[in-house]
Amino acid sequence: MMIVVMKSSANAKEVGVVIKKVRELGFEPHLSRGEKKSIVGVLGSEKHLDPEIFLVLPGVENVVPILQPFKQASREFKSESTVVVLDGTRIGGDNDVVIMAGPCAVESAEQTLAAAEAVAAAGAKVLRGGAFKPRTSPYSFQGLGEEGLKILKMASEKTGLAIVTEVMSPQTVDLVAAYADIMQVGARNMQNYPLLEAVGRTTKPILLKRGLMSTIEELLMAAEYILAKGNPNVILCERGIRSFEKYTRNTLDISAVPIIKKLSHLPVIVDPSHATGQRDLVAPVSKSAIAAGADGLIIEVHPEPEKALSDGAQSLHPEEFVELMAGLGQIAEAVGRGL
């Protein structure tokens, strides 16, 4: 795979000639317009293609092979940072850090609305909450299903928050998409390729969490499945990986944030709740994530964590979330951003 870099002076006709040539050769063109130049990605099989075919065309400045195995997710393919746009909220690039918050699982209308009102008042932009819950034990609370989605929608309409919630199978993609603003592919499904392809065929933003034992490259290759099916709206999430450490639920790879942002144009957020598994560690890890360059955080907040049906030990009380938001604002300002 390669990209054809057009000259800054190239006109629409010259770009069109390149796109036509790509199709004639049996490849799929992908046009990306930057502030100064346009590039045409040449997508298709790994068979060799002579760059000279494009270099002789008018308006072409250079032809660059993409060396990374994750083609469309790479900075080589797109140098400008992708910005995922929700209604009034922009995630990625130089925009403000976006906070997503709410309960791990939707338990009831009262619980979800109380959490939504609390996080909205504190400055969160997106309500998180699981209607379908993949659990280690088959005897644990598995979520309310579509009833949970309806509760999330109700809370969204009352607070103005967007919704992020997990989708677990290709068969439920359309159902979840009807309610959610962002569909989450959880850590346990990061390499569920039929699911990745299914969400890739939608236009909904996808929050893709890093797998429990997955490398950064494997995360980016999973994102490639979504991008390859035509959905450019992918948000990556570092949520900790499994290690030998016993003092936290997972081991947060904070270096993954700047590494991914160097390798890829996709937005990166951090989940400090699942990374640590402990309420008192959420605040310091959240601050370090923003300092490292994260484009957002996804934090568990429950009106009564002691009574939570899922992940109560790592969920913040609403008043703790308010205090955290004040501290996060200072860190964001220090790195030239806001909340």
Image (tube, grey):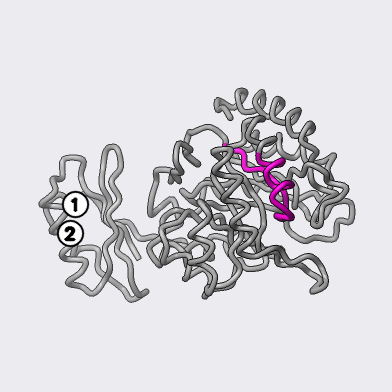
Judging from the image, what secondary structure is the residue with disc 2 in?
Answer: helix
Q: Which residue is mark 2?
A: 18
Q: Which residue is mark 1?
A: 60
Of the numbered discs 2 and 1, the one sitting upstream in the chain is 2
- Can the viewer see residue 278? yes
User: Between residues 206 and 65, which one lies in front from this camera angle?
Assistant: 206
Give the alpha-carbon distance from disc 2 to disc 1, as whole Å.
8 Å
Q: Which residues are magenta?
A: 98-116
- Inspect the image, locate mark 1, and give the three-letter code of the amino acid beneath it: Val
- Inspect the image, locate mark 2, and give the three-letter code of the amino acid beneath it: Val
User: In the figure, is residue 336 to the left or right of 40?
Assistant: right
Judging from the image, what secondary structure is the residue with disc 1 in?
Answer: strand
User: In the figure, is residue 270 to the left or right of 336?
Assistant: right
Q: Which one is closest to the eye, mark 2 or mark 1?
A: 2
User: In the figure, is residue 225 to the left or right of 254?
Assistant: left
Residue 261 in percent (x, y) is at 53, 46
